[in-house]
C-alpha cells in the first residue's frame, strides 16, 4: 500500500512501547496510521484506539489497519473531545504527533499549501470555519491575538 505520509521518529516511538505488557494505546493524531500500524504489527498483545478529525485520514487508516481490526477502534473528532468519552481500560500509552500530515499539505484542494488556489486549512472538512473566513472576517485585534504568539513561537523554534 502506498502511504501518503512518512511517520517521524518511528523506531524511537516503537521502542517507547517496549515495556508495556498489556492494554490499550491511544493514538491521538492517527493520520495515515504510520505509527499505529507499526506498533500493532510489532506488539501483538496491545490494543489500539485511533483518533483523528480528518475523515480522509480515517478512511485511509481504516483500510490500512484491517489486518488488526480486532484490536483497533477508530474515532472521528478532536482528541480533546473524544478522549474523555473512552471507556476502554487500561489505557497504558498515549501517542500524539501534532501538526499537519503530508497529504493535507500536498492536496492542493485542502488549501494548506502555498500552491493551493484556495485558502481553507480545515482539518475536518465538515467543520464550517475555514482559514479563508478567519482571514477575511476577523478584526485586526483578533488576528493579532491569534497570529502574534505563533510568529514568536516560530522565531524561537527556528
Ligand atoms: C502529523 S499527522 C499524524 C501522522 C501519523 N502519526 C502517521 O504516522 O500517519 C497529524 C494528524 O493529526 C490530526 N489532528 C490535528 N489536530 C487534531 C486534533 N485536535 N484532534 C485529532 N486529530 C488531529 C490531523 O488531521 C493529522 O491527520
Image (cartoon, rainbow, N blue to C red):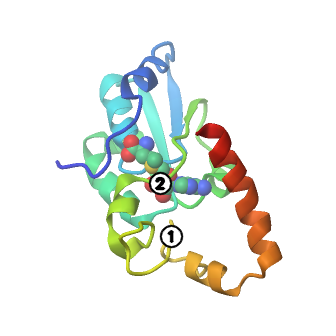
* Residue 50: x %, y % from top left: 47, 47
* Residue 27: x %, y % from top left: 50, 41
* Residue 4: x %, y % from top left: 28, 52
Q: Badge 2 is on which residue?
A: 100
> Residue pushed farthest right?
141
Disc 2 residue lies near ligand 1 with CB under 8 A: yes
Disc 1 residue lies near ligand 1 with CB under 8 A: no
Q: Quadrant of residue 112?
A: bottom left
> Residue pushed farthest left?
1
Mark 1, secondary structure of its residue: loop
The answer to whether residue 25 is left or right of residue 44 is: right
C-alpha separation, residue under disc 2 versus residue under disc 1: 10 Å
Query: In this view of the protein, which residue sits in the foreground, 30 or 120?
Result: 120
Residue 26 visible in the picture = yes
Q: Badge 1 is on which residue?
A: 121
- Seen at 68% across and 46% down, the residue is 153
The answer to whether residue 152 is left or right of residue 8 is: right
- Tell me which numbered mark, 2 or 1, is placed earlier along the sequence: 2
Q: Quadrant of residue 132?
A: bottom right
**In the rendered image, the vertical position of residue 70 relative to residue 44, given as above or below:** below
Mark 2, secondary structure of its residue: loop
* Residue 155: x %, y % from top left: 65, 45
**In the rendered image, the vertical position of residue 107 relative to residue 127, given as above or below:** above
Query: In this view of the protein, which residue sits in the foreground, 133 or 15?
Result: 133
Q: Quadrant of residue 57?
A: bottom left
- Seen at 50% across and 21% down, the residue is 22
> Residue pushed farthest top?
19
**In the rendered image, the vertical position of residue 105 relative to residue 128, given as above or below:** above
Query: Do tag 2 and tag 1 residues touch (Cβ < 8 Å)?
Result: no
Amino acid at each position: 500500500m502506498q502511504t501518503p505520509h512518512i511517520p517521524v521518529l518511528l523506531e524511537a516511538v516503537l521502542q517507547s512501547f517496549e515495556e508495556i505488557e498489556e492494554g490499550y494505546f491511544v493514538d491521538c493524531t492517527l493520520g495515515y496510521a504510520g505509527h499505529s500500524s507499526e506498533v500493532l504489527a510489532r506488539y501483538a498483545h496491545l490494543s489500539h484506539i485511533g483518533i483523528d478529525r480528518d475523515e480522509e485520514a480515517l478512511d485511509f487508516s481504516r483500510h490500512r489497519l484491517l489486518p488488526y481490526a480486532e484490536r483497533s477502534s477508530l474515532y472521528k473528532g478532536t482528541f480533546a473531545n473524544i478522549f474523555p468519552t473512552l471507556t476502554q481500560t487500561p489505557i497504558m500509552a498515549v501517542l500524539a504527533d501534532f501538526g499537519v500530515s503530508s497529504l493535507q499539505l500536498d492536496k492542493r484542494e485542502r488549501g494548506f499549501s502555498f500552491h493551493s488556489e484556495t485558502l481553507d486549512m480545515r482539518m475536518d472538512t465538515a467543520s464550517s470555519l475555514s482559514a479563508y473566513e478567519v482571514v477575511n472576517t476577523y478584526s485586526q485585534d483578533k488576528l493579532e491575538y491569534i497570529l502574534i504568539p505563533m510568529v514568536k513561537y516560530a522565531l524561537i523554534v527556528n
